[in-house]
Each structure stands twice: as C-alpha cells, then as structure tokens.
Image (cartoon, rainbow, N blue to C red):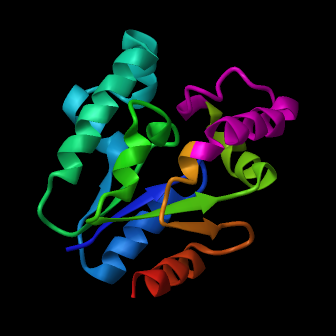
Amino acid sequence: MMKVILVGYMGSGKSSVGKLLASKLAVPFYDLDVIIEENERQSVPELFKNKGEIYFRKIENNVFKLVLQKTESFVLSLGGGTPCYHNNHEMLLQDDVVSFYLKGKAKTLANRLQDEKVKRPLLSATNENDLVDFINKHLFDRSFYYHQVNHVIEIDEKSVEQLVDEIDLKLR
C-alpha cells in the first residue's frame, strides 16, 4: 500500500500532477479541498468568507486524518496551507506515506496564479505588483512545513508529465 501526498503552494500543480500520477499508478486521486467542499456543501472561498479560516483549518485537519485512515493506495493533493496547521506536517512522515513538496519559485507561482485570484481567498486582496512579494513571504513562512516531506521536486520550467515521471521514479 502506498499513500502519496503532494504538498506545495497554490499554483504549484498539486491537482494536475496528482490526477496524472494517480492515473499512471492506477490508484484513486483525492483533492483535500474538493472533499471538504463536498462535505461542507460550500466552496473553500465561501467557507473562508462565511465561517472563517479557523473553522476551515479545523475541518481540513479532520478530513485529512480521515483520508489517511483509508486502507487503499491513493494520491492526495493537499491545500497550500494544510501542512502549516494543527501539526498536519507530522502526518506527512507516517510509515505508509510518501510525501512530495512541489517547489516553485515565487515568480513561477505568481504567473500561474495571476488569473485565479478570484478563486483564491488569500490572494484576492493583492494587486499584480505585490503578488510575487506576497508569495515570497508565504513561501518563507511555510518553508519549514513544506520541507517536512520525503522528497522535494522543483517544478519550474517542467511540464506536468515531466513532474509525474520524476515522482514515479522516486516511488520505485
């Protein structure tokens, strides 16, 4: 059994890489934010707005624990902040987990996120000029948590297929 967990900042490709990797490994793919949205019947931005970040992080931790209790192999994409709250980072190093940090430069992430600010609660208040600085600050703040993984994968200037192949090689 192999539980593969993908960690990284918004826009790092966790969902895209996760879906393709799961397909290649012939295992289910789960996106933690999607599971939360289905359970709560609200989008993540709506949850942040209506119930607040503290509520969201508590639900996120509970759902993460439930997914990790599964007795099947799978690929799981975490939300960008998931490892940083409720000691979630400690679950990345469980014996039955292989975790990967999809690490990108702030400029790469900003380019990917520029058109998605409406869907991203933490980015909605930033303007174009401040986005790289905002991401750099977050990457600095989250660095400890993001590095509590088994493997770090650099994403800059790589396709989804290249990233999946790189992860697949490390899983062998």
Does the stretch in magenta take in 135? yes
Q: Position of residue 51 (x, y in %)?
A: 37, 12
How many numbered markers are drawn? 0
Is residue 10 in sight in this rendering?
A: no
Q: Residue at x 40, y 74 (%)?
A: 21
Residue 69 coordinates in the image, percent (x, y)? 15, 51
Compare residues 166 and 146 and report the one nearer the observer: 146
Residue nearer the viewer, 138 or 47: 138
User: Over which residues does the magenta segment extend?
Assistant: 118-144
Across and down, in percent, residue 139 comes to 69, 42
Image quadrant assignment for residue 138: top right
Q: Quadrant of the N terminus?
A: bottom left
Residue at 63%, 75% in the rendered image:
159
Magenta residues, dominant SS class: helix
**Relative vertical location of residue 78 with respect to residue 59 in this rendering, above or below:** below
Residue at x-position 45% and y-position 59%: 6
Does residue 36 sit above or below 14 in this rendering? above
Is residue 131 among what the camera can see?
yes
